[in-house]
Amino acid sequence: MSLTDPRPPLSRSPDADSGGDLRFIRTAPRHLVDRSAVAEVLITDWRRVSSDAFRLAAQWPRGHHFYAPVAGAWYDPLLAAESLRQAAVLVGQAYYDVPADRHFRVAELEFEIVPSALLLGLRPAELHLESAITEVRRRTGAPTALTMETDLLRDGEFAGAGRLTLHMAGPRDHEQAASADPHPVLGTDPGHPPLSEPVPPAIVGRLDERDVVLGLPGSAAGRRDLAWSLRVDPGHPVLFDHATGDVPGMVLLEAARQAAQAACAPYRVLTVEIRSAFHLPLAQSAPCHISAARLPTQDAGEEAVLRVAAWQFGRIAFDSLVVAALCD
């Protein structure tokens, strides 16, 4: 959420712990899921069912302006990743005494989805998240990290599963966030390098070049290989929902997904599994390079398996195993 907004008191589901059905009638307060825009909140309800077990509800829009349907047929699988992230942030604040002013950073995130369960319908998808906190780390009594494992259900059927480890650092630098330009003009801010030329949007499954996070490499050798620069646009309304000095984890997941799509072009693929580790925070102010390598597939239904890495200052800051299936 915007660090300059007053944060309302910690709130919980109106029928939390009541045992009633989860509801999809309104979204969770945005500060509970670390979002600034109400339109980007996916979680609608939640409750605790036992000491470390929780049930949450999430609604996915049929026509999200960034996480748009894949090939016009499937919900974007990264909605699953964002749902897991929001769920972990909410549970941490509501039940594990995580202060609202922490800086939330994803350390590990893995998920897999069932393609048939992500097909578009006539109504927005309503999902139940059956979640369990499997580990909580503390320092001087304050929580510093938690791990959540989740099963995703749609209409009572298994739709996917995920595991996420969230680190909580902070408190955030409110003065820096408050002084940040809310409408940055790219290429003029000395704190951000100019954006590189984007990969053609169609190559990475996008329609708008502003949504492309992979930049064309400057060298001929890079153009022959699966290598790109990371395009960091701090003005992007979804990927940079609020001021932050680091590159958000969802940007790197999007880079991994776009790298897999670029490797399979011109065929369109659906990301069915991602296993990612975020080793080091990525600074927005320094160049970052993305590399990918195709791995042997082990399943006839897999179009491609790739290892994607993000490099900064000569070190691997992020790596991800991406499994993609051919859209047919």
Image (spheres, grey):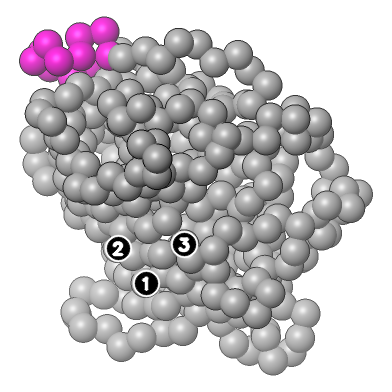
Task: Give the quadrant of the C terminus.
Answer: bottom left
Residue at the outermost front position:
140
Q: In front of the other: label 1 or label 3?
A: 3
- The numbered mark, 2 or 1, whose residue comes first in the sequence reads 2
Name the residue rendered at 63%, 17% in the picture.
5
- Most frequent secondary structure within the magenta stretch: loop
Question: In the rendered view, would you say 77 is above or below 120?
Answer: below
Please tell me which residue lies in front, 277 or 98: 98
Taking the image as shown, residue 128 lies to the left or right of residue 247, namely: left
Within-10-Å neighbours for mark 3: few <14, some 14–19, many 20+: many
Taking the image as shown, residue 261 lies to the left or right of residue 62, namely: right
Image coordinates of residue 193 in percent, x first then y, are: 82, 60
CB-based contact (under 8 Å), mark 1 and mark 3 = no
Q: Which residue lies under the disc numbered 1? A: 321
CB-based contact (under 8 Å), mark 3 and mark 2 = no
**Amino acid on which disc 3 is placed:** Phe
Please tell me which residue lies in front, 86 or 202: 86
Image coordinates of residue 252 in percent, x first then y, are: 53, 59
Q: Let me know if residue 41 appears in the view.
A: no
CB-based contact (under 8 Å), mark 2 and mark 1 = yes
Name the residue rendered at 31%, 58% in the picture.
110
For marks 1 and 3, give the CA distance: 12 Å
For marks 2 and 1, give the CA distance: 8 Å
Q: Which residue lies under the disc numbered 2? A: 273
**Amino acid on which disc 1 is placed:** Leu
- The numbered mark, 1 or 3, whose residue comes first in the sequence reads 3
Helix, strand or loop at label 3? It is: strand
**Amino acid on which disc 2 is placed:** Glu
Highlighted range, magenta: 13-23
Q: Which residue lies under the disc numbered 3? A: 278
For marks 3 and 2, give the CA distance: 16 Å
